[in-house]
Image (spheres, helix red, strand yellow):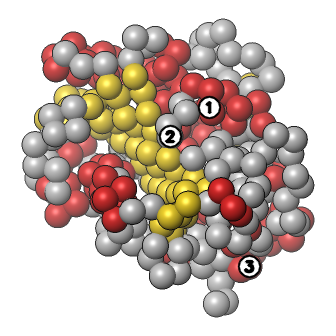
Amino acid sequence: MFVEVPLCILALAASAFALPTARAGVIQSRQAITALSTAQIESYKPYTFYASTGYCSPSTTINWSCGANCQANPSFIPVASGGDGDGVQFWFVGYDPTLKSVIVSHQGTDASEILSVITDAEFELEAVDSTLFPGVSSSVEVHDGFGKEQAQTATAVLAAVQQAMSAHSTTAVTTTGHSLGAAISLLDALYLTIQLPSASVNFIGYGLPRVGNQAFANLIDSKLPNLSHINNKEDPVPILPGEFLGFVHPSGEKHIMDDNSWVACPGQDNDSDECTTGDVPTIFSGDTSDHDGPYDGVEMGC
């Protein structure tokens, strides 16, 4: 399928998508790829709705009165929300008594906008903020645009999570989001594990771009061993920024196949053609219409 790509990213795209270079210790075996059961797929759906609801403005989210995707988790108890949808992505924090977890979600963006953010010629890999991530090695680097986005709301999110944990006597926290929201929420998950060592934090993201370098991916694997980042068919966003720039996905990919079945891809950036890195070797073989879903029937958006 032909994909119209903004001219501003063609030069980067041409060099970004050479075949990935194998990395020591990374599992690339097709044999280890496993199919998810219907029950396993359905277990993600509440989080899919929360990732979608991240697109809603705080005024609707906090009252839980926006579209059908917001109302799909009717027991949700909002705690705090913020952002303006422009300079600061919308976000919300609350508690789901059915899942028995605090939920953190950040607004995503459409495929054309996230491609522009990811491939901005001025972006750099930078060490994580030592104030927000104390004790983390300076070798752990992230896309500076994603890092700046997460820093804008980090302390407010932390305060809201602490409030929700106290009010509902829980240590379970799940961060989620789609696209740019997934990138912010992955950084939130790492941030919360460091700031709240008593919390049990997990991350479930959708259409996640690569956020950081090898050291970042390794740290995420050690801190969040059960995370999931779910990619839909030929979505090109998860193959950006390119591996040649030093970016690496953490483990935990779940890939939705063309027949709508789901598979679990072991290792970091598994290059099997059943997984996104192998299935979408270049942006030109991707389809941006897959970025918003559907994820088990759910399209992203409020």
- Mark 3 belongs to which amino acid? Phe
The image position of residue 214, as x and y in percent, is: 78, 37
Q: Quadrant of residue 95?
A: top left
Q: Quadrant of residue 52?
A: bottom left
Q: In the rendered view, would you say 60 is above or below 189?
A: below
Instruction: Identify the residue shown where x is 22% and y is 38%.
Output: 99
The image position of residue 53, as x and y in percent, is: 29, 53
Q: Which mark is residue 227?
A: 2
The image position of residue 67, as x and y in percent, is: 18, 62
Q: Quadrant of residue 295?
A: bottom left
The reply to whether residue 36 is visible in this rendering is: yes
The image position of residue 17, as x and y in percent, is: 83, 66
* First-in-chain label (1 vs 3): 1
* First-in-chain label (1 vs 2): 1
- Marks 1 and 3, how far apart at CA: 29 Å
Residue identifier under label 1: 220
Instruction: Choose mark 1 or mark 3, whichever is in front.
Output: 1
Looking at this view, name the residue that lies furthest to the front. 31
For the residues bearing labels 1 and 2, Cβ distance under 8 angstroms? yes
User: Which residue occupies the foreground of this view, 11 or 211?
Assistant: 211
User: Which residue occupies the foreground of this view, 6 or 187?
Assistant: 187
The reply to whether residue 53 is visible in this rendering is: no
- Mark 1 belongs to which amino acid? Ile
